[in-house]
Image: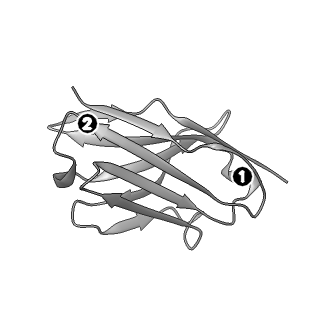
């Protein structure tokens, strides 16, 4: 079955960096678009970044120029490099994929940014 496992979260000070990973299994990773979402306390889940099977990327305005999404098809893994982190980036970060009209989420990884 499809499994998504995030890692790499943690606590950093404002201006710092973190790299999130999403290890996947149970489907043909290379042919599907992937996304990162995040959810802060009391707020709805929001799209942070996406990457197509061909490597085309898109970002939320709030993270453009600071975050970089990438994928390694040989490792069935997606990444999110987060730079110049700000307190408003504090959230649980989730990876997401839609496979054959079904949607799948990872368990999430906590990112906390202190000022």
Query: Residue 14: horizontal and vertical position, in percent?
Result: 78, 59
In which quadrant is the C terminus drawn?
A: bottom right
Q: Secondary structure at mark 2?
A: strand
Q: Residue furthest right?
A: 115
Q: Would you say 105 lies left or right of 44 here?
A: left
Number of marks drawn: 2
Who's the residue at 52% across and 40% down the image? Answer: 45
Q: Is residue 107 above or below residue 55?
A: above
Mark toward the viewer: 1 or 2? 2
Who's the residue at 48% across and 46% down the image? Answer: 37
In which quadrant is the N terminus drawn?
A: top left
Query: Residue 34: horizontal and vertical position, in percent?
Result: 32, 51
Q: Of marks 1 and 2, which one's residue comes earlier in the chain?
A: 2
Query: Residue 40: horizontal and vertical position, in percent?
Result: 64, 39
Q: Is residue 64 above or below residue 5?
A: below
Q: Quadrant of residue 58?
A: bottom left
Q: Residue 66 bears which disc, if any?
A: none
Q: Specify the color scheme.
A: one colour
Query: Residue 87: horizontal and vertical position, in percent?
Result: 76, 52
Q: Would you say 25 lies left or right of 105 here?
A: left
Q: Quadrant of residue 43?
A: top right
Q: Residues within 10 Å of mark 2 (few under 14, many from 20)?
A: some
Q: Residues within 10 Å of mark 1 (few under 14, many from 20)?
A: few
Who's the residue at 73% across and 58% down the image? Answer: 86
Q: Which residue is mark 2?
A: 25
Q: Is residue 51 above or below residue 75?
A: below
Q: Which residue is mark 1?
A: 88
Q: Nearer the viewer, residue 10 or 55?
A: 10
Who's the residue at 25% across and 31% down the image? Answer: 2
Q: Residue furthest bottom?
A: 65
Q: Would you say 34 lies left or right of 5 here?
A: left
């Amino acid at each position: 079955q499809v499994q998504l496992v995030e890692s790499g979260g943690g606590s950093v000070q404002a201006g710092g960096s973190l790299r999130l990973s999403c290890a996947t299994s149970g489907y043909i990773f290379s042919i599907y678009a992937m996304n990162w979402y995040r959810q802060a306390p009391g707020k709805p889940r929001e799209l942070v970044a996406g990457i197509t099977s061909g490597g085309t990327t898109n970002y939320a305005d709030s993270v453009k120029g600071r975050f970089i999404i990438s994928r390694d098809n040989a490792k069935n893994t997606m990444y999110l490099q987060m730079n110049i982190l700000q307190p408003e980036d504090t959230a649980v970060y989730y990876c997401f994929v839609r496979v054959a009209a079904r949607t799948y989420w990872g368990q999430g990884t906590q990112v906390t940014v202190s000022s």
